[in-house]
């Protein structure tokens, strides 16, 4: 009789963690590609729609930085010419990637907790039905 190999028997230790990480990575890549594309189009063909899209993409990291109290110093340095435009974009991009990862892990933990609760509840119901 054939036995499955060790690699086939082993389950990933934290499959939910792997899924959360890969989803967050994918969303981050999509956001960054979209941001770079919008910024490139904004510089070449600055329509009202593209400018609004750029502002909407910037609103999430701007609010997060505002919440942390880091937006005012960043704004002051940018307006004084101490920080170039690309560094502000880089800071906004990194901030957004961090937010995406935090949200992905928070949602994953919530879903994992709910799943564990439902499994425990189902086991409890199943064990109560059995005569013991």
Image: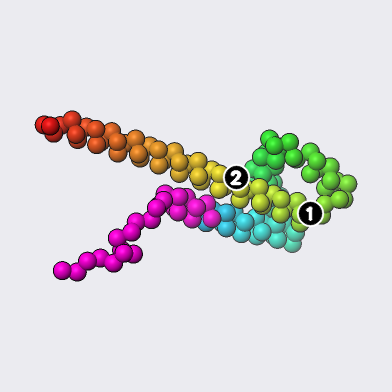
User: Picture quarter containing residue 126?
Assistant: top left
Name the front one of labels 1 and 2. 2
Examine the residues drawn in magenta and state their main secondary structure.
Answer: helix
Query: Of the numbered discs in the image, which one, if any, rests on residue 36?
Result: none
Residue 29: x and y, percent? 57, 58
Q: Is residue 84 left or right of residue 67?
A: right
Q: Quadrant of the C terminus?
A: top left
132 shown above or below 73? above
Residue 51 magenta-highlighted: no
Label 1: how many residues lie within 10 Å, few (<14), some (14-19) or many (20+)?
Answer: few
Extreme residue toward the bottom, this view: 2
Residue 118: x and y, percent? 31, 36
How far, Cα to Cα, is label 1 from label 2? Answer: 21 Å
Q: Quadrant of the N terminus?
A: bottom left
User: Picture quarter containing residue 40?
Assistant: bottom right
Q: Is residue 12 left or right of residue 29?
A: left
Q: Nearer the viewer, residue 56 or 124?
A: 124
Mark 2, residue position: 99
Query: Of the numbered discs in the image, which one, if any, rests on residue 85?
Result: 1
Q: Is residue 1 left or right of residue 121?
A: left
Residue 42: x and y, percent? 72, 56
Segment colored magenta:
1-25
Residue 9 in view (yes/no): yes
């Amino acid at each position: 009789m054939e036995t499955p190999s060790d690699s086939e028997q082993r389950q990933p230790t934290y499959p939910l963690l792997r899924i959360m990480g890969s989803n967050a990575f994918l969303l981050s890549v999509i956001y960054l590609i979209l941001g770079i594309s919008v910024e490139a189009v904004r510089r070449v063909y600055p329509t009202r729609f593209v400018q609004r899209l750029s502002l909407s993409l910037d609103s999430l990291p701007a609010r997060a930085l505002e919440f942390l109290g880091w937006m005012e110093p960043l704004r002051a340095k940018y307006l004084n010419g101490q920080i170039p435009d690309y560094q502000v974009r880089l800071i906004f991009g990194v901030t957004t990637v961090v937010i995406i990862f935090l949200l992905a892990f928070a949602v994953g933990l919530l879903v994992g907790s709910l799943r564990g609760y439902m499994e425990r509840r189902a086991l409890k119901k199943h064990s109560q039905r059995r005569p013991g």
